[in-house]
Image (cartoon, rainbow, N blue to C red):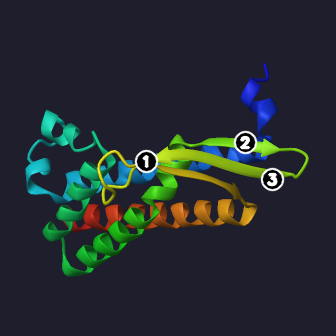
Amino acid sequence: MRTLVEKMIPARILTQYGIYLQTWAHIEYACWTIYRLADPEAKRFGEDISFPVVEAKRTTRGLLKKFKSSANQCSPHIKLRILMTYRRITNGLETRNTASHGVFFFDDKTDSLRLEHFFIRKSDPKETWRYFEDPISQTEIDEALEEADLILRELVNIRSEIEADRK
């Protein structure tokens, strides 16, 4: 079966989109795992994951706050890496949110991809909506995929080091 979206957007774009979203899902999971490994409050629950530990995953910003604070429970080397990775993640959140919640359109005539999304920034006045509607180049897609992959690889390495330190 071929869905309507598959007729609207080229398969290569849909594949890259799926890879990007799954990479970000794994980034968030890795942040949650690092928080659980490093934070004494989260660790005390062990395999019996309690509501407060799961609650940390409820919002991306809440999860990242826990991830950042877990750096204080780590060696100086790992703390620095967590804080640097936290900065890279937060710098990429708007792109991630736009990709996750925006709508892609492909124009066969111009062979171009466009993305449309409405969003709010916390720094904006109340009830101020921003509108994003721009072309997206293959270079921008490739760069976003590469950055997400590099972040995930760093998180996996950090997690492995914390696990090794805890043994």
Q: CA distance from mark 3 to mark 2?
A: 8 Å
**Mark sitting on residue 82:** none
Whether residue 167 is visible: no
Observer-side mark, 1 or 3, equals 1
Which residue is rendered at x = 27% and y = 78% of the image? 80
Observer-side mark, 1 or 2, equals 1
Residue 89 spot, x, y in % from top left: 40, 63
Whichever of labels 3 and 2 marks the residue nearer the N terminus, that label is 2
Mark 3 touches mark 2? (CB < 8 Å): no
User: Element at badge 1?
Assistant: loop
Q: In the displayed structure, would residue 112 be above or below residue 74?
A: above
Quadrant of the snapshot with the C terminus: bottom left
Instruction: Out of 100 and 84, give the one closest to the viewer.
Output: 100
Residue 160 spot, x, y in % from top left: 35, 63
> Mark 2 highlights which residue?
105
> Mark 1 highlights which residue?
129
Q: CA distance from mark 1 to mark 3?
A: 26 Å
- Indicate left or right for 37 with 160 as reference: left
Which residue is rendered at x = 86% and y = 51% of the image? 111
Q: In the displayed structure, would residue 124 be above or below residue 8?
A: below
**Amino acid on which the number 3 mark rests in the picture:** Ser
**Amino acid on which the number 2 mark rests in the picture:** Phe
**Amino acid on which the number 1 mark rests in the picture:** Trp
> Mark 3 highlights which residue?
112
Quadrant of the snapshot with the N terminus: top right
Q: CA distance from mark 1 to mark 2?
A: 21 Å
Q: Residues within 10 Å of mark 2 (few under 14, many from 20)?
A: some
Whichever of labels 1 and 2 marks the residue nearer the N terminus, that label is 2
